[in-house]
Image (cartoon, coloured by chain):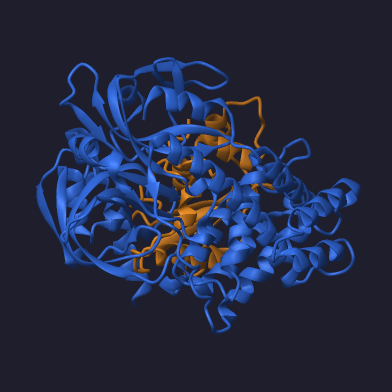
Amino acid sequence: MVPTVHGRRLGKVPYVELADGRVQGVVSSGSAGERVYVSSVSADSRTLSCATNNNRPCGGLRGAPCKHIRSLIDEACRHYGAERVAAYLRMDAGQDAKDALMGLQGPVEPGPTGVVFTRFLRYLSYLEHPGTTAPIPEMHWFPAGRSA
Amino acid sequence: MLPAALTGLLASAPPGVDEALELTDGLDAVLTDGLARPGAEGARALGDLAAATGSSPLAAPVREAVSSVGSGPVSAASLAALAGARTALTGAVHDALLAVLDTALGRTRAEAHAPAAPAAAPAPELEGARAWLTELAVAGWRGVDRDLAAGADAALTPLLEDPARRRLAVLLDGLGAELRAHCPLSGDQDPPARRWGDLWARAVLLAQDAFPAWPGAPAEEVSGRLLPLGADLHQHPTAFQVQVHALLEPSGGGPARLVRTSVSALKVDVLTRESVWGLVAEHAALLGALAEHRALEVEGMPLLDGGDLVWHDDRARKGEPADRFTAARLHLSGAAAPAVPALERHPARIAEPVLLEGYAAKRTTGPVPGLALDLDGARLPVSLLRSPDSSSLDVKAAASSGACIGLMRWDAGQWSVQLLGVAAKKAPAGQTHTADWALGPTDPKSASALRKSDPLGTLRERAGKLLRR
Ligand SMILES: [Zn+2]
């Protein structure tokens, strides 16, 4: 089964995922209400990327993570646990996972902004489908249990 | 259930169960390495499967499927035959287990009706699902990489739009999420072969054009008083289901009937624990009765052959307060149990309501810490896997209980009880049930935290802004 995730601050980071070899997600802009940033960190070369959903590069990203990437990592750790995030990014096993993630450095490159934003919209669309009252017997394979 | 009956139940599996599971394990091993390269052991396992189904209506298609494996592309018909053979075996295991459980409980079960009629029209929206399930089988669990795991999305997207395809959509999404979380498997890691085999086989059947849309049609309409016994909660990252077990006292008289009613919603991974209940808030009468421990009056509600009451919140109203333990003591032992629809027969579906009293709850250390109920020496494990975190019924409440309403389960090859509600040993009036939070957490701290964070509201607001522009 899939390990249960913990909550995160959705106002700040409405979407985060470990996918396609990256920690990636959508981060609310600190200032301009509606604007969101799509941020990512790749596992293979620790490439950092951050841009608005209209593909305008983030002005705060210069070699070290911008505040959006820092929020993304913070909330990814809250969501999945720092160990799982660090393992996904193949960080040094010896170091404390949270410390390693906070010291993150890497080249800046344009990221998969459109792809991630589309996945965010798909994610939100799950809440738009109506529920059903027809039984789903297959859900017996997915008990809402406490993952030890 | 009496301790003597429980001792008998726990002592050994019914005859034939181990042999049948050996056959499905053989197929699961082939699915682990992939149908593209079954190997000598796999070929032997497939041969055994063909022999075991040799005197059934599946004989010819299974024989054909088995002989085609390893030689060229695998046809959709071959996959359906293999999934069908596996399903027939797990169905037989289900029947044997349920029969011994019914005997132990003294429960009378209705005779099964004829299976639901096959759906007539071809369903092109299922093609993506069949293609993905074929790719999985050919690659084998060891051969599933990130891209193949992610293929679930494309397969299920056309199904999400249609609530009648919800069963398959939810199943593919659940399997896809597990494959994404675990694949590619590292060399020394074994897949949960029986579990994934179960999910795969059911998905293959649901993806057949002819699979009936309703599990136990046709429905009759029933009216009367509904006494909830408890709520069984199911969830994976993108789905949540509440299945309420209840006793129906038909308004026309006659014995109480055991029924199940289910409400479900799609969700996203971050909605867990106390935030899941908001997803099904539209069923206000049902949730109100669960949270407030009340009966329900239902009028003209469809009831399927398999005992599934198809919930219509507008045909129900909240009734008088009803103590669940009292209802269980009065009616459970004489209640009429429904037959299980043919295509749903699987050990995972066994969820029989029981009332257990006079036990000593004992924490166990074993390989993993657990809990067991000791009834005069018979030790029934408590299923922690099926103990939901979206309720206040935690291990502590369970460990200090003296009576419980639960569901008898058969998971991982052994019987256990899933707790739906417990009464404290020292103060039996103090009860905790899995659905006590149906209208929101009952402890003020969790309630105010949920109001403050409101994850469902926050995401719905974003969805409204971004998706309906
Ligand atoms: Zn940024």
In the picture, measured across the screen, residue B123 lies left or right of residue B51, that is left
Q: Residue furthest bottom?
A: B121
On the image, which quarter does residue B51 sit in?
bottom right
The chain drawn in orange is A
Q: Colour of chain B?
A: blue
Q: Residue at point 55% right, 47% down?
A: B94
Task: Name the residue nearer the viewer: B404 or B48.
Answer: B48
In the picture, measured across the screen, residue B56 lies left or right of residue B343, that is right
State the image coordinates of residue B306 (x, y, percent, origin top left): 40, 59
Q: Residue furthest left?
A: B320
Specify the quadrant that holds the N terminus of chain A: top right
Task: Name the residue nearer the viewer: B65 or B262.
Answer: B65
Residue B459 drawn above or below residue A78? below
Residue A83 drawn above or below residue B275? above
State the image coordinates of residue A7 (x, y, percent, origin top left): 38, 43
Q: Can you see residue A126?
A: yes
State the image coordinates of residue B124 (x, y, percent, origin top left): 59, 81
Q: Residue at point 30% right, 69% down?
A: B220
Q: Residue at point 65% right, 36% down?
A: A91
Task: Name the residue nearer the viewer: A95 or B328.
Answer: B328
Q: Can you see residue A78?
A: no
State the image coordinates of residue B230 (x, y, percent, origin top left): 28, 43
On the image, which quarter does residue B417 sit in?
top left
